[in-house]
Structures are given as C-alpha cells and as structure tokens.
Image (cartoon, grey):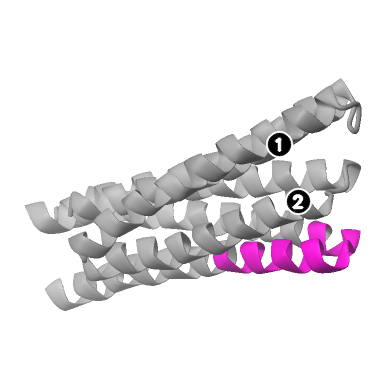
Amino acid sequence: MRERFKEDLEQVKSISKEIMAYVSSSYDKLSQYIEKSDEAILKDILDIKEDIRRKATSLERLSYELMALQQPVAKDLKLLQMAMKLASSYKRIGGHFEQISLILMDYSLNESEKDYVNKLIENEKKMAIDSIDSFIKIDKDLARKTIEADKINNDLFKEAVEFIARENKNDLISPVELAEKVLLYKYFERLGDRLARVGDLATRL
C-alpha cells in the first residue's frame, strides 16, 4: 500500500513538471512571436493555456484524492497541500499568458519594447525551470534564488512603463495604447510573482 502511495506522490511531481514544461513552451512561443510577428504563434499560446488548465485540474484532483483516501504522514501531507496551491498558481499563470497574447494581437511593439519583453521572457523562463526543480527536489536554496530573481522582473516592469509613458507624452502612442501596454507589462510582472510563489511553496516543504 505504501509503495503504491509513493508512486502516486511521484505522479504528483511528474504532473507538476509537465505543467511547467507547458509554461516554458509558452515563453518559447512568445520569443518566436517577438521575432516573427506571426499571430498564429499567439493562438498556439492560447491552446497551451487550455493544456495548463486541464493538467492543473488533474493535479488538484489527484492531490485531493490522496489526502482524502490515503491519510498521509505529515511530510507527505504538506507536499500534497503545496501541490494544490501550485495547481492554483498554474491556472493563474495560464490566464496571464492568455491576456498577454490577446494584447499582442491588438498592439505591435517597437524595438525598445521588444527588448523589454525579451528580457522578461529570458528571466522568467529561467525562474519557471528553477522553481519547479526546487519544488520537486525540495531544494530550498534554489527556491530562494528563484524568489530573488523576481526583483529583475519588477525593475524591468518599472523601466518599461516609464518608457511607454514617455512615448505617450511625445504623442507616439495613444492613451488607450498606453493603458493596454501597461497591462501587458503588468501581466508579465504577475507571471514573475506567480513563479516566485512556486519557489516560496518549495521553501515550505
């Protein structure tokens, strides 16, 4: 019975890693879009968002069933509780990718804006990989480094918003475009917050 439960716990970790692979793929797709400006790539991200949602729901269900039916010891119970919170974060991450894609469908980026987005993508993709590794391996040092890396996103957000505010002041973009692009960068900042949250969950294991 215990061996089967250990296999189920490994499945929880496996599903978690599968979902983060979708997240990493979404960042790759965003990089491709910045390079090629092909709207079909953004539609791919919308499809991946649904994959993230479905897998996160499966992770929630499995974690709940194991808690309810297996009466896990304290250490395993904590893992399952954190996995359920992880699933909730994944769903929000998928939603943020969706909103970013929808905004990019309506507004193009100049070279400076592309540079900001590429820097956000690079930092956050590394956070995505490191955060799930820290969770699965219970590597608290890596988890703390992931949390620390979110400061880069916060700084990039501020710089990007200041840049587009100047663009608006110089009548290079409209107030409506300014508002939408502030949201664009805000969603990137929220993605960073969610990935840092995964690292935070790892520190609690």
Residue found 66% across the figure and 32% down from its top? 162
Using the image as rendered, state which of residue 26 and residue 61 is in the foreground: 26
Tell me the quadrant of the picture where the N terminus can be found. bottom left
What amino acid is labelled 1 in the image?
Answer: Phe
Residue found 66% across the figure and 51% down from its top? 116
Nearest to N terminus: mark 1 or mark 2: 2
**Is 39 within the magenta?**
yes
SS for callout 1? helix
Most extreme residue toward the front is 170
Q: Is residue 202 shown to the viewer in this render? A: yes
Q: Are marks 1 and 2 in contact (CB under 8 Å)?
A: yes
Q: Return the residue at label 2.
A: 112
Residue 97 vs 139, above or below: the answer is above
Q: Is residue 157 left or right of residue 28?
A: left
Residue 71 vs 193, above or below: the answer is below
Stretch of the chain drawn in magenta: 24-42
Q: Return the residue at label 1.
A: 163
Residue found 75% across the figure and 55% down from its top? 114
